[in-house]
Amino acid sequence: MTKHNIYTMSVASVYPLYVTKAERKGRTKTEVDEIICWLTGYSPEGLLEQLEKQTDFETFFANAPRLNPSRALIKGAVCGVRVEDIEEPTMKEIRYLDKLIDELAKGKAMDKILRKEN
C-alpha cells in the first residue's frame, strides 16, 4: 500500500499555513503552538526543533512524546471526512491537528479546543 503524500511532507512546510489561517481570523501563532504541543506532548522547544529538522508528519507523530489521551474527544469533519471514522492511525493524528486548527480559526475558545473540563 502506498503512503499518502502528506506523510512525507515536513511539518515545517505546513506549519506556516496553520499560523496564517489562525492569524487571518485574529488568533495567534502562540495558540497554534499550544494546540500542537497539547496534541503531541512536544514542548515548545521540542516543536521548534522538529520544525527546524524538517521532520515529516509520519515521524513527527510517531516520535511524539505523549499523544494526548483527550484527543479521542475530537469529533467532526475535516475535508468532508469525519475524524472519528478514520482508521489509519497517522492520518487520524494529522486530521485531529487539522480539526483543532479549524476550530481555532472559527473562534472557538481555547478551553473547548483543548477539551478541558468545565
Image: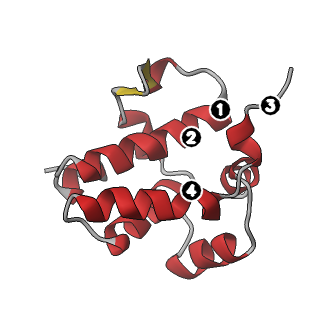
In the displayed structure image, the side of residue 2 where residue 58 appears, left or right: left
The amino acid marked with disc number 1 is: Pro
Where does label 1 land, which residue?
A: 89
Residue 63: name its quadrant: bottom right
In this view, the mark in front (1 or 4) = 4
Task: Assess whether mark 2 and mark 1 are in contact (beta carbons under 8 angstroms).
Answer: yes
Residue at 62 percent of width and 65 percent of height: 12
Q: Earlier in the sequence, mark 3 or mark 4?
A: 3
Identify the disc placed on residue 81. Answer: none
Q: Earlier in the sequence, mark 1 or mark 4?
A: 4
Where does label 3 land, which residue?
A: 3
**Residue pushed farthest bottom?**
45
Check disc 2: other Cα within 10 Å, few if <14, some if 14-19, many if 20+.
Answer: many
- Tell me the SS state at disc 2: helix
Q: Position of residue 106 (x, y in %)?
A: 21, 46
Residue 19: name its quadrant: bottom left
The amino acid marked with disc number 3 is: Lys
Q: Earlier in the sequence, mark 2 or mark 3?
A: 3
- Tell me the SS state at disc 4: helix
CA separation in Å, label 2 and label 3 = 15 Å
Where does label 2 land, which residue?
A: 93
CA separation in Å, label 4 and label 2 = 15 Å
Q: Position of residue 92 (x, y in %)?
A: 56, 33
Where does label 4 land, which residue?
A: 14
